[in-house]
Image: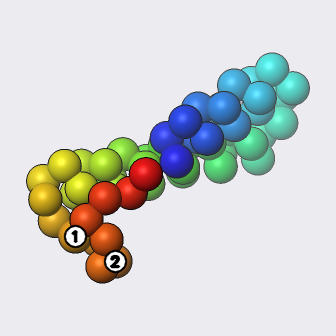
Amino acid sequence: MIILGIVLLVLGFIFSIPILWTIGIILIVIGAILAVLGATGRAVGGRAHYY
């Protein structure tokens, strides 16, 4: 999810599309939260890891 967010950020920057930039930021934040929760050993949504 973090990688997809970075890709959307880059595409939004290159093509000057603000909605891609916004979605990219949101995906990076959500991916980081899930990664931190998974690293602490806390199961989120019934899953211990998000790949």
Marks 1 and 2: CB-CB under 8 Å?
yes
Q: What residue is rendered at 13% in x and 59% in y? A: 41
* Residue 12: % across, % down: 76, 32
Q: Which of 10 and 22 is in front in this view?
A: 10
- Picture layout, residue 41 above or below residue 36: below
Give residue 48's position: percent from left, percent from top: 25, 65
3 or 11: nearer the viewer: 3
Structural distance between the alpha carbons of marks 1 and 2? 6 Å
Q: On the image, which quarter does residue 5 sit in?
A: top right
Q: How crowded is mark 1: few (under 14 residues within 10 Å), some or many (20 or more)?
A: some
Q: Which mark is residue 43?
A: 1
| Up/down of 13 relative to 27, above or below | above
In this view, which residue lies farthest toward the bottom? 46
Q: Residue at the location (22% across, 70% down)?
A: 43
- Classify mark 2: helix, strand or loop: loop
Q: Name the residue under label 2.
A: 45
Name the disc covering residue 26, or none: none
Percent of width and height locating residue 28: 49, 43
Residue, far top: 14
Mark 1: which amino acid? Answer: Ala
Please give the name of the residue rendered at 77% of the width and 29% of the height, measured from the top-left corner: 11
Q: Judge from the rendering whether residue 14 lies leftward or rightward of residue 30; answer left or right.
A: right
At label 2, which amino acid type do we have?
A: Gly
Q: In this view, does 6 lie above or below 2?
A: above
